[in-house]
Amino acid sequence: MTSDFAEAKNTIRNSCYMDDCIDSRPTEDELHSLAVELPELLLRGGMKICKIYSNSPKALESLDPLLLAKEISFDEGETVYNDQKVLGMVYNAGPDCFTYNVKFSTIRDWKDSLCISTWTKRTVLRVTASHYDPLGFASPVTIQPRRFLQDLWQEKMGWDDPLSEALSRR
């Protein structure tokens, strides 16, 4: 570990959002350096890091077991991972990918769960803002409702005015 905390500083500057840090490194050696540096640097600032998970056994084995997420364990030398929620997504360390869990199988089920009987500008905003995606990975799906909300602003209607039949269908 270097004394200047270069890996940890880079992560804090570029890969933290609120109290979550999501980062990767091209090599296990760089990741190992980060795994050692980040908890120490944050502790010097009075912040204790917790719930670390990774798909790198080398990085995980170098850490105090108390810093690891409870779902990570070592079973006869093998690292066992469970999916973890990170910034509204699910991180699956095994294949090293992000996914989303979807609660509803149809749009009708989703709409029924929202208990919306009449669409208004307010309900469209509520629905549009209900998806937490600070990194924008779901933007290809969420952009259309946001564009629709922009179109509603052009209609110059009140927040609680019912949408026309054509707009409600849309």
Image: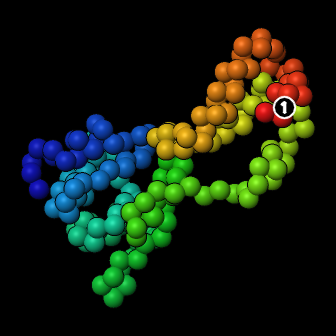
Rendered image coloring scheme: rainbow
Q: Is 142 above or below relative to 78?
A: above
Front residue of 37 and 48: 37
Task: Kindly give the residue lying farthest to the top in the view shown.
Answer: 156
Task: Kindly give the residue lying farthest to the bottom in the view shown.
Answer: 76
Residue 169 falls left or right of residue 143: right
Residue 46 falls left or right of residue 40: right
* Image location (x, y in percent) of residue 64: 28, 67
Q: Is 162 above or below relative to 137?
A: above
Residue 117 falls left or right of residue 43: right
Residue type for callout 1: Ser
Q: Secondary structure at mark 1?
A: helix
Q: Which residue is mark 1?
A: 168
* Image location (x, y in percent) of residue 46: 31, 44
Identify the residue shown where x is 16% and y is 46%.
5
**Residue 156 can be seen, yes or no:** yes
* Image location (x, y in percent) of residue 164: 88, 24
**Residue 48 can be seen, yes or no:** no
Quadrant position of residue 27: bottom left
* Image location (x, y in percent) of residue 92: 45, 64
**Quadrant position of the C terminus in the picture:** top right
